Amino acid sequence: MKILMTGAAGFIGYHLAQRFISEGHSIVGIDNLCDRGDLNLKIARLQQLGIDAENIQDAVPYQSTQGNFIFLKADVMARKALIAFCKEEQFDTIIHLAALTGSEMAKEAPTQMFDTNVVGTQNMLEAARIAGVQHFFFASSSVVHGAQAKSPLSEQDDVDTPMNMYAGSKRAAELLCYTYSRAFNLPVTIFRFFTVYGPWARPDSLPMRIARDVNEGNTITILNNGYLVRDFTYVDDITDGILSALNNPRYATHGAPYALYNIGRSKPVPFLSFVQAVETALGKMAKVQLDAASPLTRGESVEVYADTTKLENELAYSPVWDYEEALPLFIDWFRSYYSSTSSH
């Protein structure tokens, strides 16, 4: 399988690239290496993938020392260049992970988020259409469920009430994916991710913020008087699920070669329980402050966890990592990485 993957220097992109390299696939990863406070982490991920990432130049291919992986610094907004590249390379599959994320970015730069997440996705879909790609995979998010969300969240739910630009941009991109699938017979699979964590996670992700706050003694404010529920999903479950979708695609929705799935552990975990598990793993006490304010004021829901029945029935796949087992692996990496970087 010859694969093009966007967001290759990101958290999930890194883990997927590792898997593809180990399984002998030919993969080209692109990333614009934007600096949102995590450029050093992106560089470190690429170095782990065998890429000499210190002085990367735009549009220059860098070959991994570990396997059949090539990295290019490129932007999903460069439509013409992407189309020409995909026509030349004749990829079998495009995995589109690149996105701007997070509630703060959604408030501070809504236009930039829309452009990257919606126009950038349309650019990749157009490249797939013109180049005759056989399968397009898109990474969406549980945030699309919005103000009407009632857990467990199902693929059949009404998702037309997004509460911030991140949610709105991901939902708009999902609709574009369906449109391209229906209008141009492009096979598309979408996964909605639920609170993914693990080694090499994004610094602004919820699990990383919790680990950092506990480690540094910062106060963790929990809304709704401490009652929040999330579906913490270990990154290995995400990569296994994506591989299942690529190897055994099952898409057919209203006449289009299209499928959409929730992917989460499907076990609701109280926010406080996860914080306590981080405390145990780090050997430090958390400073917790309860706030009566509703999470809806921040564009978040009280309970967010997945109904994965469709994933299990159609792809014969179900995430398996409970947070009690996986969290120590995450914290081991967290301690190792941040102790080494702080000593430099």
Image: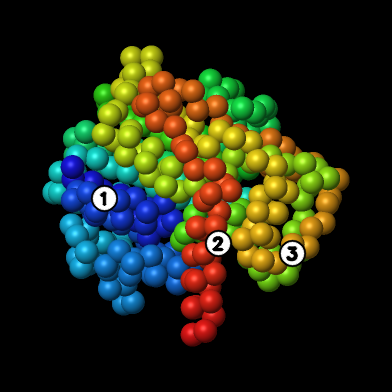
Hey, what amino acid is under mark 2? Ile
Q: Nearer the viewer, residue 312 or 193?
A: 312
Residue 331, numbered label: 2
Hey, what amino acid is under mark 3? Met
Q: Where is residue 193 in the image (x, y as percent from the top left)?
A: 49, 40
| Residue 80 shows in the view | no
Residue at which label 3 appears:
285
Pick the quarter of the image with the N terminus: top left
Q: Residue at x 73, y 49 (%)?
A: 272
Question: In front of the other: label 3 or label 1?
Answer: 3
Instruction: Kindly report the distance in space between the C-alpha atoms of the residues bearing marks 3 and 2.
Output: 15 Å
Q: Which quarter of the figure has residue 232?
A: top right
Q: Which quarter of the figure has residue 149?
A: top right
Hey, what amino acid is under mark 1? Phe
Q: Which residue is drawn at 54% across and 80% down?
A: 342
Residue at which label 1 appears:
20
Q: Nearer the viewer, residue 108 or 153?
A: 153
